[in-house]
Amino acid sequence: MTVPRTRRRSLKRRLAAGDSLRGVLLRLPSETLVEMAGVAGLDYVVIDCEHGPADTALLQQHIMAAEAHGIDVLVRVGTAEPALALRCLDLGAAGLIHPHVDGSEDARRAVAASHYPPWGERGFATYSRSGRFGTVPAAEHVAASRQTLVIPMIETQRACAAADAIAGTEGVDAVLVGPADLAADCGFPAPEAVNRLVRQAHRAIVESGRTVMTIVPHLEAARAAEEAGARLIVFNMAQVLMDTMGTLVRPSRP
């Protein structure tokens, strides 16, 4: 996380205060969409560097746009990509989403990639963008970095069975269950079978004292997720846009 110029509360502090936060998942590189999310009053954007472009120059532009509009950026990195994680944090990301975490050891590696020693193994760069190019004391830089959110993703049956161990790993702030990969791991069964595993994982996460993060397609699903206890809600922007454009199509004439 970038050392702030103003006293805006971090996502981590807002979650600790009991806030529920809403954001959007962006796979489409567009600084304008980031700006629109900030102007609309959303709390954060998730930039997808796993299934979307992993260009750090583009990522920096997105983070700059977000900071200009008072909105935070979380980045989903690829599986076991500590080098990309380091660059994302040096650029000023407020947190990282780590996919395909199957157990506590994977979760510990995610934490290690996200924090400076002694809490992790992130390399320290005094003159990084997140350190305001060396203009703040190292202690202040490190203190700001402690606000980095660490969010493992559960995406397999094995991970669901280990949800309590993953969520309970020291340094984990929230956990996101990925229903698409989970469905693939299960052999694409009936949706209710996957939903049952998701609910079980969510219960384990809450019982471990961690925040549930969940991806939703629309406002009704967001409200249902919040009522069920999720406090990090992510709207899938590609789905929102496609659904909206679908309503604009002129009906076919007979």
Image (spheres, grey):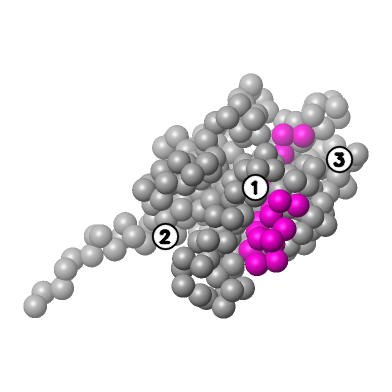
Q: Is residue 58 left or right of residue 20?
A: right
First reached walking from the N terminus: tag 1 or tag 3: 3
First reached walking from the N terminus: tag 1 or tag 2: 1
Q: Residue at x 18, y 66 (%)?
A: 250
Along the line of sight, which residue is nearer the eye, 236 or 229? 229
Along the line of sight, which residue is nearer the eye, 117 or 128? 117
Mark 1 vs mark 3, foreground winner is 1
Q: Is residue 160 left or right of residue 218?
A: right
Q: Whole-percent x and y of residue 31?
A: 51, 48
Question: What SS does tag 3 mark?
Answer: loop
Q: Whole-percent x and y of residue 90?
A: 75, 44
Question: What SS does tag 2 mark?
Answer: helix
First reached walking from the N terminus: tag 3 or tag 2: 3
Look at mark 2 in the image and give the residue it sits on.
239
The answer to whether the residues at label 3 and label 2 have Cβ atoms under 8 Å apart is: no
Q: Amino acid at mark 2?
A: Gln
- Residues packed near mark 1 inside 10 Å, few (<14), some (14 to 19) or many (20 plus): many
Q: Residue at x 46, y 68 (%)?
A: 191
Q: Point out the image quarter for the C terminus.
A: bottom left
Q: Amino acid at mark 1?
A: Ile
Q: Residue at x 77, y 42 (%)?
A: 171
Residue 163 forms part of the magenta stretch: yes
Q: Amino acid at mark 3?
A: Trp
* Range of residues picked out in magenta: 146-165
The answer to whether residue 106 is visible is yes
Mark 1 to mark 3 CA distance (whole Å): 22 Å
Mark 1 to mark 2 CA distance (whole Å): 26 Å
Look at mark 1 in the image and give the residue it sits on.
205
Look at mark 3 in the image and give the residue it sits on.
119
Mark 1 vs mark 2, foreground winner is 1
Question: What SS does tag 1 mark?
Answer: helix
